[in-house]
Amino acid sequence: MSTAPLLQIRGLGVYYATAHGAVDAVNDLDLDLGAGECLGLVGESGSGKTAVLLAIMGLLSSQARLRGNIRYRGTELLGLGAPALNALRGARIAMVFQDPMSALNPYLRVIDQLSEVSRVHGGSSRRAAEQRALEMLESVQIGEPERRARQYPHQLSGGMRQRVMIAMALMAEPEIVLADEPTTALDVTVQAQILSLLQQVRARTGAALLLVTHDLGVVAQLADRVGVMRAGRLLELADCERLFASPRHAYTQTLLAALPKLELPA
Amino acid sequence: MSNRHRGSWIAGGVLLLVALSSLIVPALSPYDYYTPQLDLISKPPMLQGGHLLGTDPLGRDLLIRVLWGCRISLLIALVASGISVGLGVLWGATAGYAGGTIDALMMRTVDVLYSVPFVPFVIVLTVLFGHELWLMFVAIGAVSWLDIARIVRGETLSLKRREFIEAARVSGVRGARMIGRHIVPNLLGVVIIYATLTVPTVILFEAFMSFLGVGVRVPLASLGSLIADGASDMQAHPHLLLVPAAVLAAIVYCFNFLGDGLRDLLDPRQQS
Amino acid sequence: MSTYDASMLLEVRNLRVSFPVRHAGRSVRVRALDDVGFALASAETLGIVGESGSGKSTLARTLLRLNEPEHGQVRFRGLDLLSLNGTELQRARARLQMIFQDGIAALDPRQRIGATLEEPLQVLKPELSEDARRERVLTVLARVGLEPQHLQRYPHQLSGGQAQRIGIARALIVEPELIVCDEPLSSLDVSIKAQITALLLELKRELRLSLIFIAHDLPAVQLLSDRVLVLYLGRVMEIAARDALFQRPRHPYTRALLQAVPVPDPRIARQRRAPPLAGEIPSSLSPPSGCVFRTRCPHAIERCALELPVLRQLGDSQVACHRAEEL
């Protein structure tokens, strides 16, 4: 792993001014993401984990107030102007959203949405972009890619839509992939496929993965390091094995204890 | 809440003011709405002499006539709207919840009634029963419930599938109790909006009927008949048209505004 | 099992439920459940697991007669539930209750909690006096760990966990013989899930409840169930005692399902495991011929496409698989 982290977050604060005072979504967060690393960010709903991803991508609503720094390869992301941010988004830093049905444009065919990424970021010709899109669909293990590419999102199953989202994220060969609960909406057997796919993708592309989820089982399988969030704060950050074996923060312990574990024959 | 709904509060206040004035002021005024004063024909608004808004072609005080007009118009509006909303909600909710043949029968009835041409209908009624005030209630109420029935049925169909309705079914709730306790209260938001849209429609309807000469009997006046009278003389005496028209417009505008505020007021989720 | 066993609390046989669905401009019938059968004894908990398209929610609704099946039998202590008319069904509702998936959505947003809890008693136990009703409401409220102040609240003022407790209270208040739980944990946060699971476990033991616990969350099913039924695309794949199912799964789908559950322990999670089950759940619009699982089954043979496997006894489990013995 290279010495300088790819993504460096210092003192990140995200808050909203409401009629009842300021509401903190994220409070004083410090986080590093190294090249090729998988960092799992775990928390329950309202912990602020999604807000962190949205802050990195510059996708928070205009009512959100931000504090702190997010540096990608030294470039400050917060407050970055639109042209510079757009050059990074989708190209160097990509995102996989939780609900593919909302994240994919229902009016565009799969191939059009995928090739759009190449054309916007690489300036590829339509033909080249479509070719790459088909390759991408194959690499995420979508059967009959030519047929699927011509379909609309609603014609695909949940698992397939999620694969398309992953393919879309990978189109421009990003260094960092942000994933917001990528398997939460999926059946458990499909989830297993997608997790396996994410592992392969990481191995193949060397991209770093910042994975946000409430499922500790998912994190156990994929993450190198794990951060536990609650009410906007990062309570504990440790190597995956250490966190599960000997959690230090009381909340982490509660979270782990609350998990019913499936007792299977060894 | 008051910030967001300031408009609604003001509208409500204005309406209340108009309603109260229409009840109180005529009792306090020396003038009545029917005694002609032939020496003061069609006088424009004047500050002295007591006729603040002028007089009509028969010398009657226009302010009093207009306030009486408001009284009649609001009465018809509220009673007729009350009838139509009540009937429409019960009809639509029952049809929607019952489903199947009952739904089909009830809604086909609505369709048939929809096709009855309204104006000839009212004219026929007037010919048969004369220019009676209650006729206005019945005629208007009998027609405007159709829209509400349709809307309510649609809402009921989507409400039926919601989890809390299923939960109520599992608790043994059915039939009239389901409709009365769970369906109708959850329709209130939609119903209020439609009711406050119905009221201005009814007022305008009545105005139109009076304009056509079918409606309240002279010397009683509604805003519509006043507008009709004023329109025929508007070149020479514009105040005869402008005053009742402005009042009608203000009332209709206020009712439209009121709907939003009322709906939020009755929603438990808005009261935190 | 050709005659009905009145000592069994619930017996379901050959249940088939289908729905009309618009597809490609035409109206077709989709089979949500096909030939589903099982039995439940008193004070027993049957866990029903399945993924999307398995028909588990449809099953819950059909047992409560929120849906009407097109074929099959449901007998509740010998009483034929499906043939009851309106009044009889209402009487039966006092004996058979349900806990819904989304606690808040299952509550009338315009009604206070107190009124919602009292309603089942008003309708199903009209013989109770007002005082008796109030007392029951307070008792059941305490039983699920809530305070009397919650009675004055509206659903939107409750948290997900609190709303689900109310759902449980409402199911318990008429003292039913059987409660069907339709994914009661799905919309809850991790720590709240644990609390509600613990509550259900406690109530189950204390009140000797008979439950049908429907979920896609396998660890919770393992915790609460005595027996488990596995559904796939509307058909029963396997029924077994809890330990038998989790320790010695017989059906290839059950095995794949257990394999796929993420394990919150990195040492185990990262071991070389069998590759995940390939393929997708087929569309209910055109289910595979023969065994519905064959399109994803690593052990499928020709026979699987031609012949529908029948649920049969194998050791202490019931399995619907042609190759169950050899695997």
Image (tube, coloured by chain):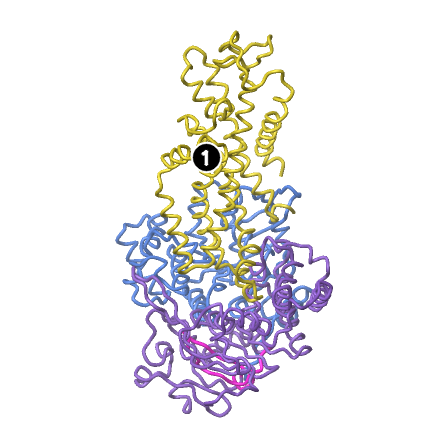
Q: Is residue C225 magenta?
A: yes
What is the magenta range? C224-246
Depth check: give the residue in front, C248 or C41. Answer: C41
Evaluate whether residue A266 shows in this view. Answer: no
Residue for badge 1: B201
Rendering quarter of residue C301: bottom left
Is residue A199 rendered to the left or right of residue C26? Answer: right
Q: Colour of chain C?
A: purple
Is A225 magenta? The answer is no
Q: Residue at x 44, y 18 (%)?
A: B230
Residue C243 horizontal/vertical position (percent): 56, 85
Q: Residue, x 66% and y 43% (percent of image)?
A: A20
Horizontally, is C271 left or right of C193 in the view?
Answer: left
Q: Is residue C48 visible?
A: yes
Chain letter corresponding to the colour yellow? B
- Along the viewing direction, whichever of B137 and B257 lies nearer the viewer: B137
- Nearer to the camera, A80 or B88: B88
Q: In the rendered image of this protein, does residue B53 appear above or below residue A80? A: above
**Image quadrant in which the C terminus of chain C is located:** bottom left
Chain displayed in blue: A
Give coordinates of residue B247: x percent, y percent. Answer: 52, 24
Q: Position of residue B199 (x, y in %)?
A: 50, 36
Q: Chain of mark 1?
A: B
Secondary element at image label 1: helix
Amino acid type, callout 1: Thr
